[in-house]
Amino acid sequence: MKTLNLAHRGFSSQYPENTMIAFEQAYQAGADGLELDVQLTRDGEVVIFHDKMIDRMTNGSGTLSDLTLRDIKWVSIDGLMQDGLPRQKIPTLEEYLSWVHDKDFLTNIELKTPTGEDIRLERKVLDLVSHYGVEDRIIISSFHRLNMARVKKLRPAIQTGLLVPGCNDHILKLTKELGMDYIHPHALSLDETLIEHAHHFELGVNTWTVNELADLEKVAIDGIHAVITDFPDRLKLVQDKR
Ligand code: G3P
Ligand code: CA
C-alpha cells in the first residue's frame, strides 16, 4: 500500500505551523492528510498549538493553559508569517474539523498535554470528532501513555498511535498492550528490524519528521503506513515517482 503523506503541523515549511492556511495549503499540495497539536485553554476549549507558551509563534506572551479562548483569539500568529498572507489566529479544533469534515483527508491529532487525572482534553477531542463524523479519518497520538490508554478506553474504535523517541521490542509490546493501532517512532530510530517487529505486533508504523528529499525516498517504502513531513510537496514528488 502507498505510504501516506502527512504534513507536519500543516505545510509548516512554507506557512506558519498549526494555522488554517498551513492546513489548507497542505491539502492543496496533495498531502494525504496532516498532523496537528492540541491543548486545552484555561476555560476548557481545544485549540491547535504546539508550544506550552504562546511567545514563539504569536505577538502575545504567557502559558497557553493559563489563557482563555478569548485571550487567545486576541493575539495573532507572528512566526514565519509572509507578506501578503491573511493574518492568522490560533485555530480551535472545531474550526479545523468544520473545514476538514467533508474532505477525504486524514488527520493525526497529537494530544500535547499529559492530563493526569483531568480527562477533559481526551473527552472534548473525541466529542468533537464524533460531532463532525470524522472517526474514520482520524488517528489520535501522544507521547503520554496515560492519555492514549484513556482514549482507547473511551472510544475503542478510534485509531490510535503511541509516539516514541526511540523504540525496541519491549516498547512495541507495551504499545500493543495499550491497544494502539500504530507506533509513531522518530525517523532516526527507524530501520528494517523495527518495521518488521512492529508488524509482528500488528502495529502500523507512522514516522516523523522526515524532510530531506533523499531521506523521504528512503523512508516512503512498503511497510510504512505514513510519513510525517514539513515538506508535503517533496514527499508528493517521491510518491508520484513510485
Ligand atoms: O507527531 C510527530 C511530531 O509532531 C512529534 O513531535 O514536537 O513536532 O510535536 P512535535
Ligand atoms: Ca506534533
Image (cartoon, helix red, strand yellow):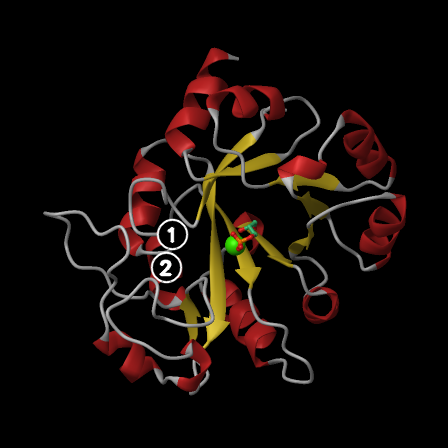
Q: Position of residue 85 (x, y in %)?
A: 15, 49
**Disc 1: which residue:** 100
- Look at the numbered disc 1 and give the secondary structure of its residue: helix
Residue 85 - label: none
Q: Is 237 placed left or right of 158 in the picture? A: left
Q: Amino acid at mark 1?
A: Val
Residue 96 - label: 2
Q: Position of residue 2 (x, y in %)?
A: 58, 24
Above or below residue 39? Residue 179 is above
Q: Amino acid at mark 2?
A: Tyr
- Residue drawn at point x = 86 percent, y = 55 percent: 174
Badge 2 local density, few (<14 within 10 Å), some, or many (20+)?
some
Q: Position of residue 79 (x, y in %)?
A: 28, 56
- The residue sitting at the top extreme is 241
- Residue drawn at point x = 74 percent, y = 46 percent: 166
Q: Is 217 placed left or right of 142 in the picture? A: left
Pick the front one: 150 or 217: 217
